[in-house]
Image: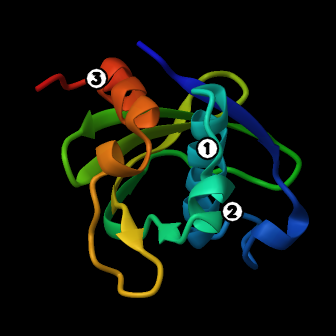
Amino acid sequence: MFVSEKQIEIRYAETDQMGVVYHANYIVWMEIGRTQLVKDAGFEYAALEKDGYVSPVMDLSISYKAAMHYGQVATVRTWVEKHDRLRTTYGYEILHENGTVAATAQSVHILAHKETLRPVSLSKIDPAWDAKYKEIAREQK
């Protein structure tokens, strides 16, 4: 299975008054993981934006398992769970340095024209990227 990994040093600014990583930061880390996966797969999200496309989040779920704290290093593991004509579902695990799972998550995205936000198929915009996602998706159609 094609899994991308990205390490993130947890900064003090990412914690709340209890010294625990604030929940919304996990979503930022998921974006960092997604960007790394795209790069590791040989593509560039910024190129899509230059061509007038965006990839908005349509759905997101996250389950928090074990708190993370300032000074730790989080590892974000990201993969393509499903990819079809209009939607891509990414899977995530955020791990402590010892391998303990801090959070699991999924996000569902579409590709859309930047101006109109009308959905468009990745196969029409970048057939090679679409083929790669179909190849590496955990759930095959």
- Amino acid on which the number 3 mark rests in the picture: Arg
Q: Amino acid at mark 1?
A: Gly
The label on residue 70 is: none
Where does the image place residue 31, in percent across and percent down from the top left? Answer: 59, 56
Callout 3: few (<14), some (14-19), or many (20+) C-alpha neighbours within 10 Å?
some
Q: Please tell me which residue lies in front, 141 or 21.
A: 141
At x 49%, y 69%, the residue is 54
Name the residue carrying label 1: 33
Residue at (47%, 17%) from the top-left corner? 2
Give the number of the mark in front: 1 or 2.
Answer: 1
Sequence-first tag of 1 and 3: 1
- Looking at the rendered structure, the kind of residue marked 2 is Val
Residue 56 in the image, given as x and y percentages of width and height: 42, 70
Quick check: can you spot residue 1?
yes
Nearest-to-viewer mark from 2 and 3: 3
The residue that mark 3 highlights is 138
Relative to 130, say whether 33 is above or below.
below
Q: Residue furthest left?
A: 141
Judge whether 123 appears above or below 100 on screen: below
Q: Is residue 110 left or right of residue 95?
A: left
Q: Position of residue 97 (x, y in %)?
A: 73, 27
Q: What is the x, y in percent for residue 65?
A: 45, 46
Q: Along the polypeptide, which appears first: circle 2 or circle 3?
A: 2
Element at badge 2? loop
Q: Quadrant of residue 131?
A: top left
Q: What residue is drawn where x is 20% and y is 26%?
A: 139
Q: Label 1 vs label 2: CA separation?
A: 17 Å
Q: Which residue is mark 2?
A: 21
Q: Where is residue 132, by image quadrant?
A: top left
